[in-house]
Structure formats: structure tokens, C-alpha cells
Image (cartoon, rainbow, N blue to C red):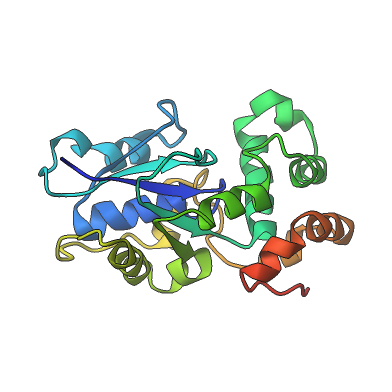
Amino acid sequence: MRMRVWLASFPRSGNTFSRFVLKEVYGIASDTVYPNEAGGKLARFLAETAGEQPSDRPWFTKTHEITAADESSPAVYLVRDGRDAYVSYAHFARLTDPAGHAAMSFDEVLRMLVSSPDHFGGWSRHVDTWTQRKRTAIVFYEGLLTDPAGAIERACLDLGVVLPEPSGQLTTIDELRTKDPLNFRKGRAATWKEEMPADVERVFWKLHGATMTRLGYARNR
């Protein structure tokens, strides 16, 4: 039976880029729990032939949902500095306009997202739930940018998930940004220093600082 592997993350944490690594470097298509996901042609490209792959290859499925307590499938979990994730998520929400976010300013959307647990449980709960479960390998966004294929390969090795030999060339973040600016806005770390107001950062740290510290993220500007 083909092995299901979750490719999980809080929104805007490198999940889609990881799918490109799997597809372009290893020839593995992946699916998603979101049938109407934004992304157009690139989203369809990532899922092409997902149902026709050899039965001995793992089946990767993207999700931003919090894991269920009884879910035991292996998971690659993408972690990004929560401040960067929220900044990127606020931009994405205004562009895609869920619940009328386009009518709000960027700072208004950012404050709402940081303070509310209604969006995928909030960053720290989402991260804690996934990273503290069994059979989860963590990939940090910052390491994914530096060594995309290596980061995914090491995570799969930790899980005992065997990938085929690399056979393709990965599209760069800059190229992806040109093709799909909605899903690839900047592709850099620490952009929160430029875009997150100091008062919002204080609220973020009050709510999520314990998890940030546990994962090794420093509070600095």
C-alpha cells in the first residue's frame, strides 16, 4: 500500500515551495486537501500525475489543518518564523479577499491574524500540535531556502521515507515569483523587521513567544 505523507504547515511557511522540490527534483507529484486552491497553472502542475505514480513512491498531501489526535501518518512539517508567516499571510489574505480582507489595511489584517485563534488555530498552537506528535520531521523555512532539496531529503530520511534519486532542476524562488507572485511574494527570511509594526510584534511575542523560543527563534529587530 502506498504511504501517505503529510506535507503540513501554518499558511505561508514554504509548503508550496516544498511541493516544487518534490515535483521538479524528485519527480513526485503531490495533492492537497484544498480542491480550489489558488495558483492556477502552477497548482495544477504540482498535482499532475499524482494518481499515476508508481505504487512504491510515497504520496504527499499538502495541508494547513491542525493534525487530529489519532492521525498517525508520517509528516514533513514546515516551520517559519511566525512573524514572517503572519506578514506573508496578511498580504495573501488581502489579495485573495477571504471575509472581505481586501477592504482592510495591511496593518489591520495583520493585527487581526496575529491576535485571533480562528485562523488555523493560531501560529503557536498549530506549530506545537504538529511538532510534538510522533512521526513528524521538521523543516525550517530558513534552511529550505538555503538547501531546498537537501532539507526535504533529510526530513524524509528521518521518517524512513525513501525518495527516488534526484533527476531534475529546481525552479528558483526568483523565477517562481515572476510566474506566480500570489504564492511567491518575496521568498526571504526576516521580512517582518520591515513590515510588522512594533506594537504588533509585542502582541505576537506575548502570544507566541514560548513556541518561538522553543524552536530557537530570537526576539530581535
Q: Residue at x 46, y 48 (%)?
A: 8
Residue lying at the far front in this picture: please name it.
Answer: 70
Quadrant in which residue 136 is drawn: bottom left
Please state if 86 lies on the left or on the right of 30 as rendered: right
Indicate the position of residue 78 as horizontal and vertical percent values. Answer: 48, 57
Q: Residue at x 77, y 29 (%)?
A: 103
Please state if 26 lies on the left or on the right of 90 as rendered: left
Considering the image in quadrants, where does the N terminus appear? Answer: top left
Quadrant in which residue 102 is drawn: top right
Choose between 30 and 88: the one closer to the eye: 30
Indicate the position of residue 9 as horizontal and vertical percent values. Answer: 51, 49
Indicate the position of residue 59 as horizontal and vertical percent values. Answer: 25, 44
Indicate the position of residue 191 as horizontal and vertical percent values. Answer: 66, 64
Please state if 75 lies on the left or on the right of 193 as rendered: left
In the rendered view, tell whether residue 20 sits above or below residue 2: below
Residue lying at the far right in this picture: please name it.
Answer: 199
Considering the image in quadrants, where does the C terminus appear? Answer: bottom right
Quadrant in which residue 94 is drawn: top right
Q: Residue at x 52, y 57 (%)?
A: 131
Q: Residue at x 51, y 64 (%)?
A: 141
Tell me if I can see residue 178 in this picture: no
Choose between 198 and 180: the one closer to the eye: 198
Tell me if I can see residue 209 in this picture: yes
